[in-house]
Each structure stands twice: as C-alpha cells, then as structure tokens.
Image (spheres, helix red, strand yellow):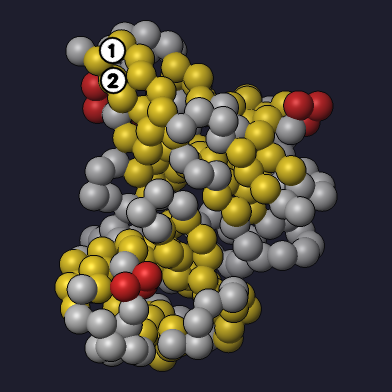
C-alpha cells in the first residue's frame, strides 16, 4: 500500500542551526514528491516539489530537498533556521502519469525553533 | 488576490445541524479537492472534482456531500453533524488531477 512516513513527530533546533526533516515513502513507482508547510492557524503552503530531473530541488524560504530513489526518501533541509520557520511540515506523494489521483500526506513534523 | 478562499473560517454548531462550507479558487484550475485534518494534524482526502466531475470519493459518511456548481467553486455540505466531524477542512485546487495542489486557509468546524 502507498504510504508516507515522517519519523520525527517533533524537532527542536536553535535559531541559526541547520535542519533536516525526514520523509520516506512507499509507492509502486517514483511518485511526485512535495513538501508543504503549515503555520499555526494557516493553510498549507507549498515549499517545493520533485517531478523528475535533478534530484536536488530548491524551494522557497531557503529550503531544499533531495530525492534518493535507493532509500525511497525525500528529506527536507535548510542550512540556517530562522525563528519564523517554526511550523508543521508535511511531506506528500502525488500521482504520476497513471493510477490514483490521490495525494498521500505524512503525519507531519512539528518544528520548534529556540531563540 | 486570494488564490483559494474558504468561508467561513470558523464554524461552531450543535450536533444534528446541517452546515455548508464554501470554496472558491481564482487560479483557473480544473480540479478541486476537500481534505479533512483531524486533531492530530492527519490530512486525508475526502473528495475531488475535475471539470465538475467527481473523480475521488473516499470512504466518508454519506452525510457529506460535495457540490461543484462550476469549475471555480466546490462546496461541502454536511448533514446531521456529529461530534466526530469536528476538524479543520481544507479546500485545494490544481490545474489538473496530477498537478501541484494549492490549499485554502481552512475552515475549523466545531460540533458541540
């Protein structure tokens, strides 16, 4: 069955420190991959996406993610975290050229940033 | 210039009532969605319409009925509300069913 796993429910980092949020997926083929961020009381904002091509993807707000097919992973990184990055982060897999239309979301990782 | 908008933002109601949530997108997208986010932040697809045609209909109670009067609107009507319906409901849209989805701000529904 298709699934997305975000192993870390909570992560706390100090402002200025580097960040890596993990995402693993189980899918029949290489899916489309996404990272979204949800600030408190807000909707989901797209950070970045991977469809094909270069496995290192740049997104907004200084985030990047790397697709590793061999590990079925799509981890999100940021070299220096800002206090405004505190939010909930969701990894998602989406439909490719055939099969289901559904997005499947991970359970989210809540990021806390210490001043 | 809001891309995907939802009304109302908050909805508090009694058990047994019927309520509707409205969604509008001005992106010119063909596909729209409804998601439910529970208290643990788990996000699950409920319905999707493409060009006003239902293409995703997950296992949700038939008290929930989506309606798409045109491609820019997808409303969610809920009959006989139950305590377990309390959640945040998100609308989203995409250019086509396999494209990137863009989300609205959410509607927090509280059933008392």
Residue A49 point in image, percent of width and height? 56, 41
Q: Is residue B26 above or below residue B19?
A: above
Q: Is residue B3 visible?
A: no
For disc 2, the marked residue is A113
Q: Position of residue A107 (x, y in %)?
A: 50, 44
Q: Pinpoint residue B27: horizontal percent, then vertical percent.
A: 40, 66
In the displayed structure, A94 sits above or below A48; it is below
Q: Residue at x 27, y 50 (%)?
A: A42
Q: Quadrant of residue A68?
A: top right
Q: Residue at x 31, y 67 (%)?
A: B86
Q: Is residue B22 left or right of residue B69?
A: left
Q: Could you confirm whether marks 1 and 2 are on the same chain?
A: yes
From the viewer's perspective, tell me whether residue B85 is left or right of residue B57: left
Relative to A89, A70 lies left or right: right
The N terminus of chain B, quarter of image = bottom left
Which quadrant holds residue B9?
Answer: bottom left
Callout 1–callout 2 Cβ contact below 8 Å:
yes
Label 1 lies in what chain? A
Residue A40 appearing in the image: yes
Closer to the camera, A37 or B24?
A37
User: Is B111 in front, or is A45?
Assistant: B111
Front-lying residue, A79 or B13: B13
User: Picture coordinates of residue B58 (x, y %)?
Assistant: 59, 74
SS for callout 2: strand
Q: Is residue B14 above or below residue A26?
A: below
Query: Callout 2: few (<14), some (14-19), or many (20+) C-alpha neighbours within 10 Å?
Result: some
In the picture, residue A63 is in which quadrant? Answer: top left
Which labelled disc corresponds to residue A15?
1
| Residue under the image location 61 percent in, 67 percent down | B97
- Quadrant where the C terminus of chain B sits is bottom left
Spatial CA distance of label 1 from label 2 is: 6 Å
């Amino acid at each position: 069955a298709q699934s997305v796993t975000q192993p870390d429910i909570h992560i706390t980092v100090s402002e200025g420190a580097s960040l890596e949020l993990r995402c693993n997926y189980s899918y029949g083929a290489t899916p489309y991959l996404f990272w979204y961020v949800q600030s408190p009381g807000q909707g989901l904002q797209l950070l970045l996406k991977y469809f094909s091509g270069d496995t290192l993807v740049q997104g907004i707000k200084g985030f990047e993610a790397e697709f590793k097919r061999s590990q079925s992973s799509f981890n999100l990184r940021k070299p220096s975290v800002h206090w405004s990055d505190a939010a909930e982060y969701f990894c998602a897999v989406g439909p490719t050229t055939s099969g289901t239309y559904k997005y499947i979301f991970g359970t989210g990782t809540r990021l806390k940033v210490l001043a | 210039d809001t891309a995907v908008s939802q009304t109302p933002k908050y909805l508090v109601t009694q058990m047994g009532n019927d309520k509707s949530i409205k969604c509008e997108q001005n992106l010119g997208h063909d596909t729209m969605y409804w998601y439910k986010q529970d208290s643990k932040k788990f996000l699950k697809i409920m319905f999707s319409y493409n060009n006003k045609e239902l293409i995703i209909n997950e296992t949700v109670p038939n008290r929930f009925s989506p309606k798409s009067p045109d491609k820019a609107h997808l409303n969610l009507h809920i009959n006989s509300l139950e305590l377990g319906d309390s959640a945040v409901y998100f609308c989203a849209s995409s250019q086509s069913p396999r494209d990137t989805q863009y989300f609205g701000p959410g509607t927090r529904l509280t059933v008392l």
